[in-house]
Image: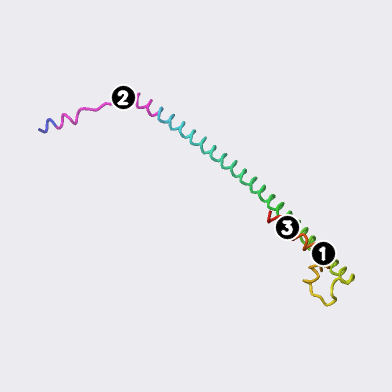
Amino acid sequence: MANSDSSTATLPIAPKKENTVPIGSKIAELNESRSDLLNRIQGLKQDLQSWRSKLDTQVKIHRDELSELKKSLNVEVDQLRKEFQELKNTLQQQQEDVTASLRNLGLQDSTGDAKEAQEPMLDVEDQEVHASVEEVIEKRDEN
């Protein structure tokens, strides 16, 4: 039995040169493949960075445009407010002028309130015209 153990131990295992060449070429092939993959990854990283940069630029441009539009709209709103205030003041002044004119003409009681100033007084002729118009409307409605 000891003989069989010693015979196995004494046989040298020599690597065959045929097997080492394919392993070397496989290693070279894997190294080349690894290099290609690393290059592709690097290219993809650069593309991603480029896209991010372009997106950041577009976002900044759009934010700037929106900011300018907002400023422009605020200026327009302020201008419209001023114009409406001017119109309001003009209308108030005109109303005061009309009220003063009516007072000067004596068509309004000097102690009359503002409601009377806004409603013109009808004289007898105006009342007759108003009544005749109502009659014409009633006759038309009956037909």
What type of secondary structure mainly makes up the magenta span? helix
Q: Position of residue 58 (x, y in %)?
A: 62, 43
User: Residue at (48%, 36%) from the top-left corner?
Assistant: 41
Q: Earlier in the sequence, mark 3 or mark 1?
A: 1
Q: Is residue 60 shown in magenta?
A: no
Q: Earlier in the sequence, mark 1 or mark 2?
A: 2
Could you tell me the amino acid type at mark 3?
Answer: Ile
Q: Which residue is mark 3?
A: 137
Q: Earlier in the sequence, mark 3 or mark 2?
A: 2
Dot 1 crowding, Cα within 10 Å, few <14, some 14–19, many 20+:
few
| Residue bounds of the magenta highlight | 5-27
Dot 2 crowding, Cα within 10 Å, few <14, some 14–19, many 20+:
few
Q: Which residue is mark 2?
A: 19
Q: Mark on residue 126? A: 1
Q: Quadrant of residue 119?
A: bottom right
Could you tell me the amino acid type at mark 1?
Answer: Asp
Spatial separation of the CA atoms under disc 3 and disc 2: 120 Å
